[in-house]
Structure formats: C-alpha cells, structure tokens
Amino acid sequence: MARNNNIHLPKSPLSIANIKKSSRIFRFMSRTDRWYFIIGTFFLALTAAAALLFPKLLGDLVNSASLKIQEKNNANLDKLEQTAIYFVYLFIAQAVFSFLRIALYVRVTENMTYGMRKSLYTSVIYQNMEFFSKNRVGELFSRFSADISQIQDTFTSGIATFLRQLLIIFGGVIYLFFSSTSLALWMLATIPVVVIISLFFGRYIRKISRQVQDFTANNNVIVEETLSGVQNVKAFSNEHFEVDRYSKSAGVLRKESIYRGLLRGSFSSFIIICLFGSFIFLIFQGLTMVRANEIPIGELITFMMLTGFVGGSIAGIAEQFVQIQKTIGAVERVLDIIDTPGEAINDNSIKTDKISGNISIRNLNFSYPSRPGFEVLKDISLELQEGKSLAIVGPSGVGKSTLISLVYRFYEPTHGQIFIGNENYLQMDLFQLRNSMALVPQEIILFGGTIYENILYGNPDATEADVIAAAQKANAHQFIELFPEKYQTIVGDRGIRLSGGQKQRVAIARAILKDPNFLFLDEATSSLDSESERLVQDALEKLMRNRTSIIIAHRLSTIRNADNIAVMKNGKIEEYGDHDSLLKIQNGLYHRMVEQQQEPSEFFQDSEVIHQ
C-alpha cells in the first residue's frame, strides 16, 4: 500500500568534490549572465556596506545631539543636520543598490533555470524505457518542481542573503574591535557556547525533520494512490477504509510535527536567552564605560546595533548554509539526469528514404534490465514479409507485448538479432525507424488537449483536411461531429471524457495520420459493446491494409485473417504458421482453441487452469 517515497530535498555534504561537481551548473549561464552575476554581487557588497554604515551614522547622530544639548553649540547643530542628510543619501543608495542586485540576480537565475528546465526535459524525453523502469514518475517530477525551485530560490535570494550575512559578520566584527576591543571580546565569548549547543540541537532536530518529511511523503503517496485508483476504491466500497488509512498516517505526522515544533521552540528560546542575555550584559558593561567617559554614548549605540546585526547574521547564516547544502544536492540530482546518456543514435547509421517492411527475428532472447535473471523471451525466431500480418496469441505474461516493444526498439535484445530488410535494426537511425512505425496499445493514452491535437500528434505537419480524412477512415469523424466543439473538444486527463471505443478510434486515426510502414496493435475490443467493437474492428482492418502488421490478437476473426500466426507459451513460440497449417497440428494449442470455438483470452485461461 503506502510506500516510502522520499521526495523531500536531502542535503548534500559541503565538500570540495561536491562543490566542484555542482559548479557544472554555471554552464547554463551565458557569458553575459556571468558578468551580470558578478555585477549583481558587487551591488550586493555595496548593500551590505550601506547596512553597516547605518549604525555608524546613527551613533554619530546621537553624539551630535548629545553635544548640542550639553554645549548648546550651533556647530554641533550643523553636524546634526549633515548627519541626517547622510541618512537620506544612505537610504536612497541602499534602495538603488538592492533594486539593481535583485534585477540582475533575477535575470541571471531565470535565464539559467530556463536552460536547466529545457535540458532536463530534453534529457528525460530522450531516455530509453529502462530509465523509466528505474525512476518513478513522481521522483522525476520532483526534479522539475522541487529541485528546480530550490535552485531558483537559492540563486535569486539565498546566495545573496548568505553573502550579505557573511559580509556583515566580517565587516561588523572588524568595526567592533576597532570601536572597543574589550566589549568585542565580551560579545564574542558567548559565540562558542551557542555554536556548540546549536550543533547538538541542530543535528537532533534535522533527524526529527527527516522523519517528519518521510511521514509527509507517505501521506502524499496515500493520496496519490487513492486518487489514481479512485474507481477501484468506489468499486470495492472502501471509502471508509481509505479515510481511516489516511487518518492514521496523518495522525502520526501530526504527533511528530508537534514534537518537532516543541524542539524548535525550545531551541529558539535557548538562542534568544543566550543572545539577549549577552546583549543585556553588553549594555550594562557599555553604560559603565560611558559613565567612565571611555566611549561616547553614540559609540555604544553603534556598537549595540552592530552587535545585533552580527548576531542576527550568525543566527541566519546557519539556515542559509542548510539551504545551500540542499541546493547542492538538488543541482547534483538534476545534472545527473541531464548528463545521463539518452537512447543511442549511431552517427554512421543507415538512412534510407523508406525502410523495407521485412522483419526477421533471429534467436532472440530477452530479460528486462530490472530482472536480468529472468528470461521473458527465449530463442524467438520468425520471418514476416513486407505488407503481411502476424497475429500473436498466448496466455498473459508470456512476452507478447515485450516482443512488440523489442521490434519497436523500446528495448534492445539481450541475445539474438532483429533485421529490417537485410540490415540489423540496431544500425538504423532510431528516429527514422520509429517514424516508420505506429503503435495502437491496449490501454489508449490521450493527451489532455483537444481531439484535433491528439490526432495531429501522429503527424504534426499534417493539414486539417488530413486530420479529418484520418478520422473518417478510423470511424471517428461521426462521433466527433456530434460534440458541440467538434474537433476542438477537450478530451480531459488521459482522455477521460471519451468512451473506450471513442478513445480507440482517436488513437487509430492518429496512427493512420502517421502513415506507417509497420503497425503494432494490441487488439482491445473485448470490453467494448458490440457496436463500438464493430466500428473499432472495421477501423483496424482499414489501418492494417497493405502494412506490415503485428497484432496481439484477442479475437478469432482477427487470427483467421492474419497471414501468419504465432502461438506463444512460457516465452517461446510453440506453434507458427498460417491458419490452415496450424489446424493440421493434432492436439496443438491453436487446433484445440479453434475446435472449441473459444476466444484466445478464454481458451488460455481455461488451459492455465487445466495445467495447474
């Protein structure tokens, strides 16, 4: 049921190797954007400098006001006004510097993440099927959403905040020592204690946070599974069970989240006590020095404000450090996918205007990469001439769909060879090969756009007249015209607004528009009503005409009409030939099936029961 789907963002250790690996991200920055980033960082430094000047000017303002009151000197009044004018200049400068930094960083970040998104999507879309069997869709989606967002946030504001806090810490501490060495030493004395306890607390809180993230992921998986299979939930009247299952999972999450909140609250209270305790101590120590005329009151105010700035930056830089660690992890995960080689394309591939329709499979063995020890197909050999059809029958799980996947080159043979014409299909241009093929699967997948867009997917360069002609040949035009929006009707997620027969006819129209040399069908008419079945079957027969076709057959009529028939069992071809030759095999699987007048699905189910 629920699975541990870790979609949170783990941190990556901040090592030289990881930083070097993550620096590959800068290849998505153009030379111009790199200069913009450097200039933006310069404005960031000016913003930090302006922030450090604020306490200094405020201290000068207080000193001038204090001298004016004590001495009633108009010269001090002029200095007071001059300092106030400096304040105005400082605020304006800081506003301008901040705007320029933000504008440059946003431009650089958006350009960079655009390139990353495009490269990531391109890399994923060009991966082979083995890649998708090893990587869950939810995890891949997390790369596009959570990881890219993490990178985007860090480069837009996280890096800026981190650098600004570093500059304030170093600049502030230097000024504090110049201002009063004794007070600066008192201020820094509390830092080691806070850091040591923070490390202990932080490590434990991170452990609890990971547990909370795991429970959150489990909650999300329950919702994802339930909504994806909501029809099954309702079919089995399990709404109450699912609500109870989710409530238990959410209850555990609530308990752990409350515990984490209490820990964070305790930790924050400790930090506040330490910081404000040391702050109050510094105030009393500073006032003692003011009364002894060791420092003026304005200098004490400057010192206390800078202490607050430095303390706040120290407290904040730890969180930014964690975010940067997460970003390094996000960059590594995204770049690992981007740098994963896609489906092999031979630069020296054989390219012809039209690929020959002869298919020759020789001594083919195949195991899925995820299960290398289990052979799905064993020593398969067959010949299919151009323009002829092959019907494959057999019980479920014997490798019928796998055989089509191999010919379509979704996977490559473990052993053996497949030839198209006289050439090994591994030496052919992969895209040209697939462009000569069309697949109508048993489970029809439509995209969430319009009917017109789904048919046009078979050939994006086709005209509107071509689309309508394909729909007519697929017996789809009539029902499409009944919709108010006709071809512009939205089909919904995965074609949910269309019936099963309507989806199949749209898929057939899509295949017709592609005009393939090779056609692969997983004939799925058993779940349709008689009228839809008749229309779909008629459309399939039109589609197969004069095309090299391989059909996973579920109906006796389709099998009889095929030029060749392959009967599969346990990953092997048990019988092969045309209808008449297979009938001559006494006690053969095909002979018994026809003799009993059973459809393949029924016959092989009964056969499995008999042989158990």
Image (tube, rainbow, N blue to C red):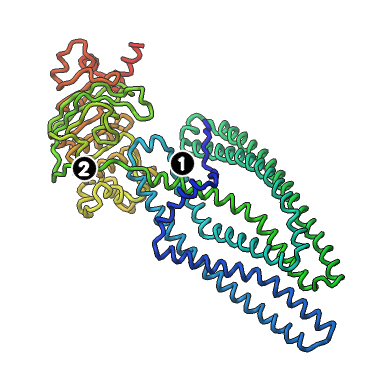
Left or right of 409 on screen, residue 340: right
Where is residue 608? Give x, y as percent: 33, 15
Front residue (pair 594, 46)? 46
Left or right of 471 on screen, residue 150: right
Front residue (pair 317, 576)? 317
Residue 71 sits in quarter: bottom right
* Residue located beneath label 2 in the image: 429
Front residue (pair 409, 510)? 409
Q: Residue at x 14, y 44 (%)?
A: 352
Mark 2 crowd level (few <14, some 14–19, many ≥20, 10 Å Cα) = some
* Residue located beneath label 1 in the image: 139
The amino acid sitting under disc 2 is: Asp
Where is residue 381? Give x, y as percent: 19, 23
Left or right of 484 on screen, residue 246: right
| Residue closest to the far bottom | 74
Residue 474 sits in quarter: top left
Q: Residue at x 28, y 50 (%)?
A: 481
Q: Please, is residue 102 above or below residue 272 in the view?
A: below
Where is residue 102? Give x, y as percent: 52, 66
- Which disc, if any, is residue 363? none
Q: Report helix, strand or loop for mark 1.
A: helix
Precedes in sequence: disc 1 or disc 2 = 1
The answer to whether residue 599 shows anywhere in this view is no
Quarter of the image that includes the C terminus = top left
Marks 1 and 2, how far apart in space? 31 Å
Q: Residue at x 15, y 40 (%)?
A: 355
Depth-wise, is mark 1 or mark 2 nearer the camera? 2
